[in-house]
Image (cartoon, rainbow, N blue to C red):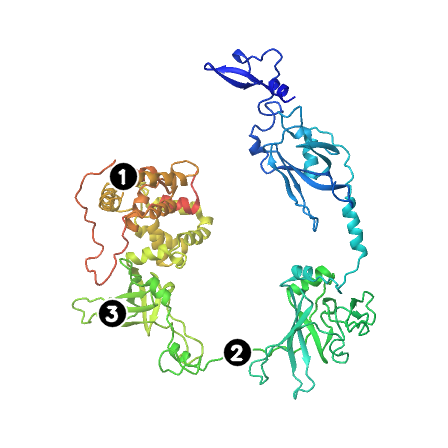
Amino acid sequence: IGKEKFHKSQHWGYCNNVAMLVGEDKPGIGGEPLPGQKLKPNYSVFPEEMGNGAPAWVAFDKQVLSFDAYFEEEVPDKNQELYRIRHCKIYFYLEDDTIQVVEPQVKNSGITQGTIVRRHRIPLPPPHEDQFYTIDHFNINIEVILYARRYKVIDCDQFTKNFLRKMGIRLNTPADRPDDPYTKERQEILNSMKPLRPYEHIDTLKQFLEHDGHVLRFFCVWDDPESVFHDPRELVLRYYLSDDTIDIKEIIPVNSGWDVVPLFLRRDKLPKNAPTGLYQPGTITSRTVLNVFGKLVGNRDHYILDNRKIGTVHQEFYRDSDLKIGAVINVWGRKITLCDCDEFTKEYYRTKYGIEHFTPVPYKAPPPPKPEKTFPPYNGFGSEEDSLCSCMGLIPKPPQKDFKKFMEKDRSGMESNILGFVAKLITDSPIDKDRKFIISYFLSDDTISVFEHTAQNTGILGGKFLERGRIKKPGQELFKSEPSEYFKAQNLFVGARVCFHGHNFLLVDADEYTFNYMEKHANEFSVADIDIILKKLKDIAEPRSQEIRQMFAATDPEHTKVIEYGSFRNLIGSMTDGAFSEHEIITIGRYYRVRDEYEMDLHSLLAVAQEQLKKKNFDNFEQLSAVLIYNDREKCGVLPHQICRTVCKSFKLPLADDNLQVLLTMFEDDHKQVEYKKFVDGLNWRDNQIPAFQNIKAPLKNEDGWSRQPPSFPAKGIKYLAFLDDLLGKEE
């Protein structure tokens, strides 16, 4: 039979004139099958072009069919059993059609259990041993033969059933699971036997695992009758759900004179009838043991477990169901009232017992209102802050300065953080009317200093007029408990009237740094916020829009679209009837001003910028342009001024902030949008290098630098048409 099977499946052939053994699956010439030859499928029993096209090891990864089966094993060398039924699991791995047979381990079976057949492809029984088991060979209530052992498949899991139904396989009815006769007999013997030793299983592990770390917390009070003043003692009761134990901790008030102890009651189960229902040690046990023979048989004891528990003493302990707000519990003779609980405890009782109302029980008087802290009036010695610190504690401490503000607003490079104003005295004296003062406000510590401008042939010495320091606002009481108000930066602006120690000043102008600083921090200075100013002006000008347009047009008879600042100031003053300060009018004029020639020279500015970029070896223009294009979501070629400035700052463009702002303004269109492509091309010193030029000397705003006296209005004119369009809307 072996020879016939061998000749049937294989035959001799020649390869390169060498005789060798080949299989019957080898086709003939041209790949055509030989007469009588049946070719088997090479890869799968399923037709092509089915499924998602992914390989089986990807499509069916970690998908396993599980079948319940058993097989009978003969036992020829024992009289107690003739055969043995062994239950097992058959796993079919879909990714590679491999099969594994595993027998679950049974306690004290005496049989080596575990993997019966390791995972691999199992061939079919003869005469088809050249083929392997596939999914089509499996179903419920059938028999499969794996290596001459017959397995009865009785059932499968839900995933396997669903998969087989999708494959179009009609499932059979599940078969019954037979019991092993010998195992059943042994189990009956074990059930009828009683243990020789007294044993009773008490399982508390489940409760511990479910509620470990879960603690109910109640706030309690105990009215101690032995206390001299009958003060209520505040307690915290904690109930541990893992083992139904209770501990109590006392809250000791500060300076109460009571002894401090770690715990009021150590953690243990709390009996309900203590201390009246106390029992002798050994009376209450978890198990009852009976001595059957006593000392009658050879002084040998024989004990058995009392399953009936006759004479067992039961002691009741407090459980979670006994604890609720308002209940009074007995803690070893002390009556303790539960007054309140925490949120976890409320949620626990709400979920388990359906309790919704947790009204706390008031157990102590409300605390008296905290007396308002009053300070004595200022006595005139030292500063007010120093005198106030002596009232804060027994040990006087010096007043603390705002160090963070000092570090942020201190001088740093070209940023002086000093606001400079030109002021005049408000007086009728002809000598004092022409005196000019420089008022400096230091933002780091809110101090003010005043210097007087030196004028020739006046008989008045210039120089320091007022020492640097904080200045109180006038009209305040000197000796009072409340802190005094001091001049802030918001109180100083062009047109403001201030009184410094009895001297009335009128602020008539400010330097360029002050105007720029206030405009950059417009959220702090309302007189420099163009949006707020235009909104106030719009409410006034809307009813007279046509008249206002005619007034501005009459001021420009030659239609140059530009008017002088003096005329613009007079028109704004007539429109507002003096309601606007001088600083607000200057802010409008600066916003709509016509820039000077030296400011408008784009060629010169780009040459200076390229020179700086070249010295710093900055040539990352392609990436800068790419980031700007990325921020242009609408792909319109323009971006807002602030976005372009932020992108340039992120690239650490080696240009001063003022120069960068001016350059971006030069490339703005009519809608205040920056044409970023032209901007980058203008800065690109490699591709668009601007030849060297003679530096243009801008006219100095003030030759006398120490006095910091600014000019009047540094602009040639005001573009009033843009101002009217923003204020009243574009005219049709």
Q: In this orientation, does residue 717 appear? A: no
Q: Where's residue 218, x and y in %?
A: 66, 70
Q: In the shown orientation, is residue 17 left or right of residue 626?
A: right
Name the quadrant of the C terminus: top left
User: Which mark is first along the chain, 3 or 1?
Assistant: 3
Q: Nearer the viewer, mark 3 or mark 2?
A: 2
Q: Nearer the viewer, residue 152 or 504?
A: 152
Q: Where's residue 684, x and y in %?
A: 27, 39
Tally of marks? 3
Q: In this orientation, does residue 428 appear? A: yes
Identity, as a three-letter code, of the amino acid under mark 3? Pro
Identity, as a three-letter code, of the amino acid under mark 2? Glu
Q: Secondary structure at mark 1?
A: loop
Q: Nearer the viewer, residue 212 or 85?
A: 85
* In the rendered image, the vertical position of residue 615 relative to residue 346, given as above or below: above
Identity, as a three-letter code, of the amino acid under mark 1? Asn
Q: Which residue is mark 2?
A: 372
Q: Which residue is mark 1?
A: 684
Residue 102: quarter of image:
top right
Residue at left offset 28%, top offset 39%:
682
* In the rendered image, the vertical position of residue 667 relative to residue 126, given as above or below: below
Residue 690: quarter of image:
top left
Q: Secondary structure at mark 2?
A: loop
Residue at left offset 66%, top offset 62%:
208
* In the rendered image, the vertical position of residue 225 relative to residue 92, given as above or below: below
